[in-house]
Every structure is written in C-alpha cells, then in structure tokens.
C-alpha cells in the first residue's frame, strides 16, 4: 500500500475535531458509509485513514489524513481532486499541505523542465535575480503593445510578459499580438545584445492553447504564461509533457487560495511542470503576509529529488523603490516583476526599466562580494 499524507486545518471545537477528521477521510476516499462496504480491497487500501488530530490554538486543528495513492494515477488534476475535491465545499476547512510517496512522485515524472536555472541560463543571469515586467493595459492594439515590449527590452529586462487578461480579444488577436511583440523584442535585442524573452499568455480550450503554442514556436519563442486555476492543472501537466522546451510561468489568476494554502498550490503547480510561480508580494495591492510569501518561495525552491527548483515571482503593485528590500527578503533566487510602476513612466519607460535592471544587478554584485569575504 502507498499513501499520500494530507494536512488540513479545521476550524471548530475540540469535541468535533476527531469526528470531522474521520468524515474527511471518508469524503476524500470512498465517499459513502464504510459500514456499507464489504470489499476488502476498498476497506484495506482505498478508504482514507486519520493519522493525527492536533490543536493549533485559536480554535484551529491540524488534521493529517492518509489517502490511497492508487486513486490518483499520474494525473495532476485528479491529485487535486483527491486532496480537496468535495472537502473544499466546507468553509471551515483548508488544504494546508501534502506529501507524496516516492512511487507516486516518480509516476508524475516530468515536473519542471526548465526551472530557475534554465530561466537564468536563457538570459545570461547565472548569479543574480531575474527581472520581469508586463504589457498593460487591456484594450491596446498589437502595435501599441509591441511598442511597450520594445521599450522594456531596450531597458534590458529579462522577461516581458503579456498581462494575464490579454487573450483573444478583437482589439488584440493572439496571432497578431504575438507576431508584433516578438518582432519588437527581436529588434531590441539586436541593439542591446541582451536576450530578452517575450512571454505570451495562453488561454482558451486545450485545442486553442495548442494552436497558440504552435504560433509561439513559429515566432521562435521559448516562454509562455499559463493560469493553472483557469486552464486546469491536468492541462498544464499535458502541455508540459508535449512542450518540454517551453518555460511555463504560472499566473495566480482565480487561485485566491482562500482555503488552499498558497505554498501548497505552489507545490502542486511545480509538480505539474510550472517553471516559475507568480504571487502577490506582501505590502502590495493584495493581502499576503511576509510569512506567506516566504513559504511560497520556499515551496518553489525546496530541494526535491528529481524535481527542478522553480522561480518565485513576487508581484502585484511593486515599485522600483522596493527592489533592495525585496532582494534582501528573497535573495538572488527570485524573479522580480514590476509592471504598472514602470509603465507609469510613459516616455521614460526604457530609462526607468534600465534603472530597475541596474538596481538588481548592483544588489546582486554587492551580495556576491559580501559572500566572498565571509
């Protein structure tokens, strides 16, 4: 038998915790009264088990459940279903963490194919943090988005991505947008010598996304962005398997994580093959705490046998003024994403981007010198 160990956080009374734990184990496994089952295999190897129930204080309890690995196969979507499918409907329960047995981890096999090291290598950034920005706002035509992409690239940015809301709108059709932005970034890289990557946002049905990836390949691009909570975790996993040379940045749209711990989501997206995870940095326009952001970064970078580390990408209302603080907080194993603060510079976009890039380079160089003197 092989078991997945799942941790939930339950809010409620101590008197109810044990019974709720047993109910969760049943709900996430056989979903019917165990006394009505007479099959020994189902009862012995499929029925979930309560491993532990422990108080965490403040009316919160940590519940550890063992779920059968046989119920998952090698499907990332089914893994999420078994971890939290029906139980996500209980508003007093949070999916906090999970640990896969080695054989199930091996069944997934693929994982990130590019990862943090590959993202660094593609832009010649072996020993520093990465830089990124976004093309905004919605409503601009391809030519205007391309102008912004070229300005970012002339400033020496590493990665410039579509805003996640850019899809197949009439004012910016995907083929025309990608062709225009890719050409603009190519022009800039000829001038700067820096291999800036343009990152189109993928959206739509799986067939539509596959066509988008075909267009990306024709344009010579090697990076794309997906929103796993919108597109579906199993679809992201399949795209990774079909396109091992594409680096996938995971966007948190629709992944509010109100009852799935954000670090747990990062583990799931990494397992499905994302090479970077974008998340709201603390102190921005979203409500994540510093502690939550640190755990997300740790989940992206934690050593896992056979699983590449991926880039944590803090974002969401960040400014160039916060670059030193963010690098002190995350270190060099990070991709800093600053969008609106740079775009607000208007005609100074390239200069402001260059200043952002220079700050990152200077901080990384200072950190490296400090380490060499330890």
Image (spheres, rainbow, N blue to C red):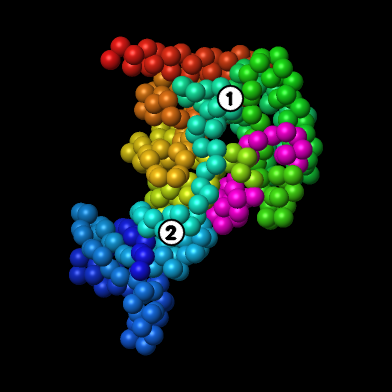
* Quadrant housing the C terminus: top left
Quarter of the rendering containing residue 206: bottom right
Instruction: Identify the mark at residue 104; answer none if there is no mark.
Output: 2
- Residue in the picture at 24% in, 70% down: 18
| Magenta stretch contains residue 239 | yes
Point out the stretch of residues depicted in magenta. 215-242
Question: Does the image show residue 88?
Answer: no
| Main secondary structure of the magenta stretch | helix
Left/right placement of residue 250 relative to residue 321 reads: right
12 or 201, nearer to the observer: 201
Residue 358 x/y as whole percent: 52, 14
Left/right placement of residue 329 relative to residue 219 reads: left
- Residue in the picture at 51% in, 37% down: 115
Of callouts 2 and 1, the N-terminal one:
2
Instruction: Identify the mark at residue 123; answer none if there is no mark.
Output: 1
> Label 2's element?
helix
Quick check: 105 above or below 69?
above
Spatial separation of the CA atoms under disc 2 and disc 1: 34 Å
Q: Are marks 2 and 1 in contact (CB under 8 Å)?
A: no
Label 1 packing within 10 angstroms: few (<14), some (14-19), many (20+)? some
Label 2 packing within 10 angstroms: few (<14), some (14-19), many (20+)? some
- Residue in the picture at 77% in, 38% down: 218
Residue 103 x/y as whole percent: 41, 58
Quarter of the rendering containing residue 197: top right
């Amino acid at each position: 038998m092989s078991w997945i160990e799942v941790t939930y956080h339950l809010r409620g009374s101590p008197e109810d915790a044990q019974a709720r734990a047993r109910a969760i184990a049943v709900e996430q496994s056989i979903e019917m009264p165990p006394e009505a089952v007479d099959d020994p295999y189902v009862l012995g190897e499929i029925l979930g088990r309560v491993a532990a129930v422990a108080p965490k204080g403040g009316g919160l309890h940590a519940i550890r459940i063992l779920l059968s690995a046989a119920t998952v196969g090698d499907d990332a979507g089914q893994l999420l279903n078994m971890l939290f499918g029906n139980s996500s409907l209980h508003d007093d329960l949070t999916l906090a963490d999970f640990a896969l047995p080695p054989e199930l981890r091996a069944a997934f096999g693929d994982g990130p194919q590019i990862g943090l090291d590959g993202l660094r290598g593609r832009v010649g950034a072996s020993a520093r943090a990465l830089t990124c920005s976004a093309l905004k706002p919605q409503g601009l035509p391809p030519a205007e988005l391309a102008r912004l992409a070229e300005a970012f690239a002339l400033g020496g940015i590493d990665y410039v991505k579509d805003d996640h809301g850019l899809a197949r709108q009439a004012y910016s059709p995907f083929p025309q947008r990608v062709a225009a932005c890719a050409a603009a970034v190519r022009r800039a890289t000829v001038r700067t010598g820096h291999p800036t990557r343009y990152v189109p946002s993928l959206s739509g049905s799986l067939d539509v996304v596959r066509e988008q990836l075909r267009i990306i390949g024709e344009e010579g691009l090697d990076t794309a962005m997906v929103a796993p909570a919108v597109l579906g975790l199993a679809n992201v996993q399949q795209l990774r398997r079909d396109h091992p040379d594409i680096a996938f940045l995971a966007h948190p749209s629709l992944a509010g994580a109100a009852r799935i711990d954000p670090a747990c989501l990062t583990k799931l997206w990494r397992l499905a093959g994302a090479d970077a995870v974008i998340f709201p940095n603390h102190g921005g326009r979203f409500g994540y705490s510093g502690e939550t952001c640190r755990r997300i970064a740790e989940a992206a970078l934690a050593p896992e046998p056979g699983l590449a580390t991926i880039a944590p990408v803090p974002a969401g209302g960040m400014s160039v003024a916060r670059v030193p603080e963010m690098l002190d907080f995350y270190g060099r194993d990070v991709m800093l994403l600053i969008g609106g603060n740079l775009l607000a510079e208007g005609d100074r976009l390239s200069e402001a981007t260059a200043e952002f890039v220079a700050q990152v380079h200077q901080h990384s160089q200072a950190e490296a010198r400090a380490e060499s003197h330890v």
